[in-house]
Each structure stands twice: as C-alpha cells, then as structure tokens.
Amino acid sequence: MKPPKSFTDLRELSTEIHHLNSALALLHWDQETYMPAGGINPRSHQISILSTLIHEKKTSRKFKQCLQKLVHMPSGKPKVKGLSKIHLAMLREWHKDFNRAGKLPASFIETFSQVTSEASQIWAAAKKENNFKIFAPFLEKIIGLCRKKAEIYGFEDHPYDALLETYEPCMTTRKIDVIFGGLQKQLTALLKKITAAKQIDDRFLHRKVSDEKQLELANWLVANLPADPAYTRLDLSAHPFSTALHPHDSRITTRVLPNAFMSNLLSVLHEAGHSFYEMGLSTEYWGTPIGEATSLSIHESQSRLWETIIGRGLPFWTHFYPQMKKKLPLLKNIPLDKFYRSLNKVQPSLIRVEADEVTYCLHVIVRFEIEKALIEGKLSVADLPEAWNAKMKEYLGVTPTNDAQGCLQDIHWSLGDFGYFPTYALGNLFAAHFFSAFSKQHPDWEKKVEQGELAFIRDWLKVNIHQWGRMYNSEELAKRVTGKALSEKAYCSYLKKKYAKIYKF
Amino acid sequence: MKPPKSFTDLRELSTEIHHLNSALALLHWDQETYMPAGGINPRSHQISILSTLIHEKKTSRKFKQCLQKLVHMPSGKPKVKGLSKIHLAMLREWHKDFNRAGKLPASFIETFSQVTSEASQIWAAAKKENNFKIFAPFLEKIIGLCRKKAEIYGFEDHPYDALLETYEPCMTTRKIDVIFGGLQKQLTALLKKITAAKQIDDRFLHRKVSDEKQLELANWLVANLPADPAYTRLDLSAHPFSTALHPHDSRITTRVLPNAFMSNLLSVLHEAGHSFYEMGLSTEYWGTPIGEATSLSIHESQSRLWETIIGRGLPFWTHFYPQMKKKLPLLKNIPLDKFYRSLNKVQPSLIRVEADEVTYCLHVIVRFEIEKALIEGKLSVADLPEAWNAKMKEYLGVTPTNDAQGCLQDIHWSLGDFGYFPTYALGNLFAAHFFSAFSKQHPDWEKKVEQGELAFIRDWLKVNIHQWGRMYNSEELAKRVTGKALSEKAYCSYLKKKYAKIYKF
C-alpha cells in the first residue's frame, strides 16, 4: 500500500532534517581539520544557529501535525492500517524522537548549553593546572541539571536510566549493573593472571616515527581496507574521529604521535569501523530513522571490532606485517610474534584512552559506578577524587598521583554527558557478541584474513547489522544476530583465550 | 541614540542569515576541495535545502515586520529619527534586499533553478562534443526566463539593467555602453601596436613543473603576502576560487597546470586579492550589509589589482624573482627583464580565462554586446555562433575554429547569469581607477614593493575600500576614493604606459 500523504510529508521533513544535520556535521569536521584558527568564533555561531534550526524542525508544528495524522498521541499506536513493517518502524521511531525532543523546555536547553560551555573551558584549565577545586562547583551544577533532565524525561526505576536513554535507548542501570558486575570480576581476575606472567618488552613500538612516515602508513592501511575511496577520506585532527554526511560521504581522521605509531594505525582501524557502519546504512531509507545507526554502543561495537578483534589480531598482521616491515625499517629485526604480543601488551594505566583491551572496560566501569553514585546523590562532588582513586586501585591496581590523571582526565562530565561512558564498554561486549556469531558462520575467517581478505567481514556486518538502522534496538539486534541476549560472556571468553596464548598461562 | 528593538531584532536576523550563508559557503568550498566524489548527490540536497531556508528567512514575515516598523513601505524612507549614518545605511540596504528578494515568485525561482540545472549539464556535453545545436533550445529558454526576470524586477531604461543590478547595483546598460565603447577602441588600437612590434619568446613559462614544486611555490608566495595565516588558507581545486565565511575565515584555492606554473601563482594573487577584501570587511558590522562587499565589480577590482597591477608588475618581481629563481632551476638563465616581459606577453587568443591584460576586456566586451542583443531580441540564438565569431574577429583579430572554443566556452549563460560578464571588465577599470589615487598618495610605492613591502597596499585598500562594505555603492566609492566617476581612462593609461615599455614603441 502506498503510504498516506502525511507519511510522505513527514518523511520529506525528516530527510530535510538529516540533510541539515549533514551540513552541521561538516561544520564540525572542518573545525577539527582545516578551519583557520581565527574561524572558531564565527564557527560556534554557525553551529549554534544551525543546531537551533534543526531542533525547531524536529519539534515543529508541521512534524506534530503529520505525526498526529498517523499515530495516536501520546501512545504512538498507529492510526493508519496497511503500512509496511519498515514504515511502521519509521513511525515508531519518529514518534519516540518527537516526544523526547519536545520534553526539554527551550529555557532548560539554553541553561544546560551555557553551563556546559563554560564548564568545559573551566575543565580544560582545571586539568591543565591539576586543580579539581575550580571545576567542582561547575560539576555540581551539571549534576543538578542532569538530575533535573532525568526528571523531565521521566524514568521508572532509576534516574540514570533516563540519561542512558539518550545514548543507548534500551539499556537500563539495572541491566548494566548485572553485566558490568560479572565483567569487572572476570577482567580483574584475568588481569591478575597477566600481571603474574612474564612481561612483554614493547619498547620498539615507542620509537620515534616521523609524521610523514606515519601518514604514509595510515594511507597505506586505508588503501587496503574494504572501502570505496569515492565514499570516504582520511585526514588529520588533534583527536581521531569519524563523521558521516551520508553513506556515500563518510570521513575519518587520525593523529600522529611521534612515539606511538601504532596508536595512529589502530585509530585508523577504529574510525574505519565507525565509517563502515555509516557506509553500510541503507541509502534507500536514508533520511529516516531506519537509515540511522541504532545506538552509540552498536556504533562503538563496529569500531572496536575492527580496531581490536581484527586489528589487534594475529591473522590481520600475518598478512600486513611483512608489508609494513618493508615500509618501516625499525621493524627489521622484530619477528611477527614479538610484534603481535607487543601490540597486545597489557599494562594497567591511569588513562582510559591509552588502555589495552583487558583494562579498558575496567576504566569504564569505574566511571559508570561513580556517575551512578553522583546522580543518586550517594557520592558528593567533594569526595569524587578520593572515590575515583579508590576504585582505580581496587579494579586496576593503580592509583593516580594527581587529579589531572585521575577524575579530571575526560571531558565528558564537563559537557554534561552523563550516561555516555557505559557505551564504551558495551561496544566491546557487543563486538565480541556479534563476532561469536560471525566466526561460527565463517569458521575459516582467520585463514581468509591471513590472505588479506577483509571485505567478507564488512559484508557480513552490513547484512546483519548496518543495513537495519533503527529497525531494531540494540537488544533486539543482539538476539537476532546471535540468538542470545547481550552478556559479558563472549567478550570475556575472547579475552581469556587470546591472552592465555599471549601470556602463556 | 540606541536603535529601537525592531532594529536590533532585524540586525540579529540579518546576522543569523549571514551565518547560515557561511555554512552554505563551506558546503561549496568542501565540494570543490575535499568532498569524496560520492558525496555529490547528497551535497546538492544539502545546498538546496539550506539555500531555501536562507531565502525563507530573507523574505520572512519577521524580516518584513521589523522593517515595516523602521521604514515606510515601499519607499524605504526611515520612520525612526536619530539613527546614525551607518544604521541608516543598513536600513537602506536591508530594504533594498528585502524588496528584491520578494519580487521573484517561488514558482519562478524553481523553474529557473530547474532549467539552469539541466542546461548546465547540457552545456558541458555541448562544449565537449562541440555541438551548439543541443544547447541552443536551452539557451533560448534561459533567455526567455531572463527577460521575464527583468520584467518582474522592473527597469526604467533597458531590460538588461534589471539583470545587471543583481551583480552591480548602480550600473546601467547605457553607462556601460559609453565606458566599453571607449575601452574597446583604445584596446583594439593598443593591440594593433603590440601586434606590429617584435614578439616575445615566452616558451620557458610553459615548461613542465611538477605538482609538488608548484605547490611549494604557491605556499611560498602565500607566506609572503600580507595576510594573517590564522585567518586564511590555501587549497587545491579544479578551478581557483575564493570564499569567505567571515573576515577571520577567508579561504582561497589554486590549481596546478603542468605547463603553466605562472598561471598557478597568478591565481594565488588573484584569489588573495578577493580574500583581502573579505578579510578587510568590518568585523563590527559583519552580519549586516555594511559588513558585505559592495558589488562584484569592486570585488573583482581587488583581485585584479593584486593579480595584474601588483602581481604582473616589475617592482613585485624585482623583489620576488631572485627568490623564485632559487626554487625553480628552469629559470636559471632567464634574467628578470625577460621574465617580466614574458609574463606580460600579449597575444590575442580564443579563450577569455587565458587572456592577457590587454585582450581580457575585449573578450568581455564581446560577451556584453552579445548578451545585450540576445536580451533585446536583436540577435537570435541560432545566429549566436556567427555573431560571436564576427565580433572576435573584429575586436581581437582571431576567429574560433569551433564553438567549443567560441560561444560555448563559458558556463555562465547555462546558469542564467546574464549581466555577470561586464563585472569582469569593470573590475579591471575600478582597479586602475583606485590605483591611480593610491599611487598619488604613495609616490614611492614601487620602491617599497621592490623591498617586498606589500602590507601598506593592503592597508590602504582596507581603509579606502574594504571597510566600507555596502555603505557606498561602487559609483560613490569610486568618487570618494579618486574624486572622479569611473571611466576607462585610468586603465587605458596604465596599459598604454606599461606595454609601450614592454614592447618598446
């Protein structure tokens, strides 16, 4: 059945919003890549004006009027019969988005934006000067605003659920408690075993490599990935990121650190994973929720899958290491096995973004537990540094010597992004969860990767994950792909097997 | 006196429109520089949607309501007393823009956009295949639409005046007839003298220079120009252009042709001239018409001043040639005098964009006279190729062997840009007109440039031209700066003096 006019009108409006979002994405991309420094002040105005326009369209009377012709409000139950399954899913998600977008009053959005804009600048100074006290009052304000936000959005069980929903719609605090509880125990146990084993000397990975050489390596790697160069590009930025204006215009960046050339290449693989997801979304349904990524965790699962399961894996480097050796003389006397083990060296550290596969999720769990306690009011801002240090000691066995390397290290809280951190760990769990299904269907995958074949992995991900967009939420997707709900099992089993071999226990 | 609220509201709306225009400019810039090829289809949607939004804001009820509180409609006479001269000028220009923007019905804009979008594709094919006939019916449609447009805008004397107004508000067909009449005669006479003189051997300028070397030269030149690198950048694109998102974010591009390295460097100077203008606009009044360029001709006067009067001048190369010689071995045995004369070699050719200083305006005059005749209906589309060839023969002494190198060479007509071409020639005349005042105030300018000093030229242009924005129209500006109305005199006298020396007559 041809959908009614109000449906096609709504779809047109939704597509228009998506195109404006793409223009906004370009403003951000340019700011991080090519914008002359003097452009920053006008850029913040351009971004703010365009963001406001987009928000106005998302909450517009036109949007509401179309929606009201199609679904009962506020329930969202369809009024129109005979719509296809995909059209019904679009309606469901439009209704959800509209409801959520309209909940926060403009005055609240403005306050939130002003406070976090100032707070992120104060945070940068606080981190630089290692002075938590100057940031503390802002963090208190932000926590107050986040509690208020949770109240406005509403929740059944825990205020943190309402914050989680922004980033991971079907996840709850309770579910995460269960998953992270099991994960933390197993990771800490694994870490103990690794710490007790013979340590790896990875110093060659931290020898100086010139910017030019690193760029050459990054471009060589990108050229060997299964991506159409007509749809993507690689640039440099201070922090690596991925952004997509459309499945046919999806861009990644990397950075070069003189003494960590593999950080650059792993960033390329991480961002390429994000980019494959965006390029794998439906072009037919682009502009509707079905052409959008499911959630942040699923996005992160794609980046981590390529960065870690593939990109830190032996089959991948069995193929690529001989080529890289030719390009990088410092590797001359390093055999593949030593390279592979060094690349996967586990060492508890203070900084999340530098963490290895085993300790990474522990960093995230520290933040999750602290966030939850802050939102619950069980932890005061004044006690945050101490609580942070205690948890780092408990889970990772290391204690920050200052707050800059402790609770001030991440920008997220200053931006009001409470509820975001868990997606970093969930991404790893989803990656391993999906990959367990993939490897059953492709029992010879390691052999193929050893031959440099990678497209079949991307194809599988496209068919099983990317193409669905928001047709399914992350919970449904996990079940569809693997038959099982998400848990920490696949991830822990993957890590245990991999690291037992590397550390020989 | 503090301006009334309706004034500040209107100013805020105008600034918002300018910021959205900047986002639009970035979409265009990116399309020509870094966008992956696959991004073109979504890009055209992004551009079209944002353009529509901007047009809606320019013609919005809010704009009208603010304006109506401030001026009598339709006369534009201010209602409010005590406004400053600058605020009155803003009002005058807002009123003018609003009136003009509202005149074309949405249906006309859509038709125009559809026809020209298709026509520009057909034009590209027609040029490639050297087949004027397939383009002719589209050109006929476009001429019809342009006549219609002129009617809608209204005119007193000549329909072409209404088309000119889009690009050069205070210029009329009658005024151009007078100026171009004198110009054509003097140029043709000068050209005859040059053709009769001993010709220059400039073959070394067409030796192959690698892309890398050309980029190095372009960056070296930019680094020596009086521009803050925090406010500008240089990139590559298929056709050189300049775009500004703000006076603090003004970008230029160049291109490298293997056998024309000086074309690259002259493009850099041309686009830098445009960029200086944008960077010289008032930041205080940015977002209002007083922070906007006066007109296309004045813009072109800035680019041509830097490209030709400065950048093809002996003082400039007296300073820079020794440096360039060190960078480019092929110049080793070429003395400065030979380089300078070769750079200024005059040779009537078929293609406008490759024309020297003497013949350039003749190309423009050919187009102007033909445009005028097409709009008047005195020339039919079918007779265009013949008319073109006849005029080229008459003014430049050359005859195209095919239409691709004749009347099909420029894209402008396919885009419906009737009225645009004259600004290319007027830009040269304004440049020389302004420069005559500058050189009187800086009689030692040549000596300074020989020392590599350039900032004083840019400063003078900023104070006398850039900073005024649309405070004055081009006619008023010409009189303010020089005391005299624009004519061809300064330009012809500049050319005669320069080329008599070069060609030794």
Image (cartoon, coloured by chain):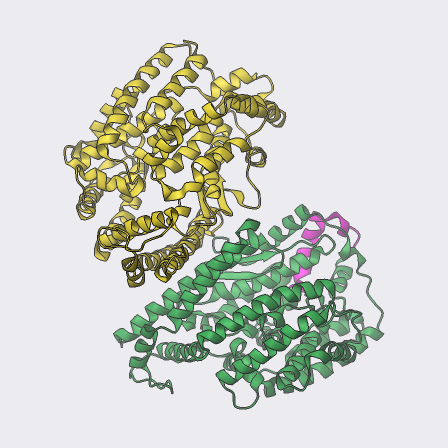
Chain colours: A yellow, B green
Tell me residue A56's x, y (percent): 31, 59
For the view shown, which residue lies furthest in the bottom direction? B157
Q: Is residue A11 magenta?
A: no
Tell me residue A326's x, y (percent): 63, 25
Tell me residue A387's x, y (percent): 21, 28
Q: Is residue B322 magenta?
A: yes
Residue B284 in sight in this render:
no
In the image, is residue A122 above or below residue A444?
A: below
Quarter of the image that includes the C terminus of chain A? top left
| Residue located 49% across and 24% down the image | A206
In the image, taking residue A42 as reference, residue B122 lies left or right, namely right
| Residue located 22% across and 38% down the image | A161
Residue B64 in sight in this render:
yes
Question: Where is residue B394, by image quadrant?
Answer: bottom right
Quarter of the image that includes the N terminus of chain A? bottom left
Which residues lie in the magenta part? B311-334
For the stretch drawn in magenta, the main secondary structure is helix
In the image, taking residue A186 as reference, residue B38 lies left or right, namely right
| Residue located 79% across and 60% down the image | B202
